[in-house]
């Protein structure tokens, strides 16, 4: 497969948000309409193949890529948000990040029992965030049919935290 248009656009920002972290900045991809469309089209095709019935986006870059996938497929979009952002009744899961810990939440009615959910984020690092989002989906009695992201930092072995789920990463670093 030829290199993605987005691959050379991923910008490394050293020491953000903490010393020693190389932050993979996807904003140049958003500024290139063809590259942005290519990644959305690939994730859309993957979600379709997995039989997705709803798309779950992880705040906040998972929203940017997840919403167009949901619209392309005519599917609902559900938000997995950081602690304290969702207004209605919600459930929470704590997880460890590559840099620190965090809590992710979903509304109690965001997933219908038995619904197949495809989870989208920009990047898979340790897999803690994606695993927490998957636990939320499962607590709401949904089924995780796949996880799609632009970038996988394979040296962090995030897949070890997500062994039950099919993972699609468009690029690996
Ligand atoms: P993890 O839970 O360790 O898989 O971390 C994934 C989440 O943290 C995603 O929402 C990413 O946007 C963000 N993240 C973690 N590490 C990085 C990184 N090196 N560059 C950009 N985003 C990151």
Image: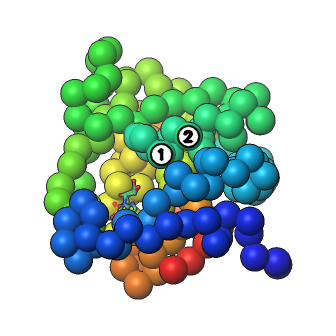
Is 173 or 121 nearer to us in this picture? 173
Residue under the point 45% across and 75% down:
153
Label 2 crowd bin: few (<14), some (14–19), many (20+), radius 10 Å: some
Residue 3 horizontal/vertical position (percent): 75, 76
Residue 123 horizontal/vertical position (percent): 47, 61
Q: Is mark 1 within 8 Å of ligand 1?
A: yes
Q: Is residue 141 left or right of residue 136?
A: right
Instruction: Report if the CB atoms under discs 1 and 2 are less than 8 Å apart.
Output: yes
Residue 16 horizontal/vertical position (percent): 28, 63
Is 46 or 124 nearer to us in this picture? 124
Element at badge 1?
helix
Dot 2 corresponds to which residue?
Answer: 64
The answer to whether one can see residue 2 in this image is yes
Find the residue positioned furthest to the top: 88
Disc number for residue 100:
none
Q: Is mark 2 within 8 Å of ligand 1?
A: no
Classify 60 as above or below 8: above
Dot 1 corresponds to which residue?
Answer: 61
Which quadrant of the picture is home to ligand 1?
bottom left
Residue under the point 72% across and 30% down:
71
Residue 141 horizontal/vertical position (percent): 45, 37
Residue under the point 53% across and 52% down:
27
Residue under the point 44% across and 21% down:
109
């Amino acid at each position: 497969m030829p290199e993605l248009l987005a691959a050379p656009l991923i910008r490394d920002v050293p020491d953000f948000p903490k010393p020693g972290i190389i932050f993979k900045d996807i904003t140049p991809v958003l500024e290139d309409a063809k590259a942005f469309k290519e990644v959305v089209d690939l994730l859309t095709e993957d979600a379709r193949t997995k039989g997705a019935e709803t798309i779950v986006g992880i705040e906040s870059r998972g929203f940017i890529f997840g919403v167009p996938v949901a619209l392309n497929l005519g599917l609902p979009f559900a938000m997995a948000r950081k602690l304290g952002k969702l207004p209605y009744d919600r459930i929470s899961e704590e997880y460890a990040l590559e840099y620190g810990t965090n809590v992710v939440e979903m509304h109690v009615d965001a997933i219908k029992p038995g619904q197949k959910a495809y989870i989208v984020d920009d990047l898979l690092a340790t897999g803690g965030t994606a695993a927490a989002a998957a636990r939320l989906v499962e607590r709401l009695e949904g089924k995780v049919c796949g996880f799609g992201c632009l970038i996988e930092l394979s040296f962090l072995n995030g897949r070890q935290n997500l062994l039950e789920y099919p993972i699609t990463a468009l690029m690996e670093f």
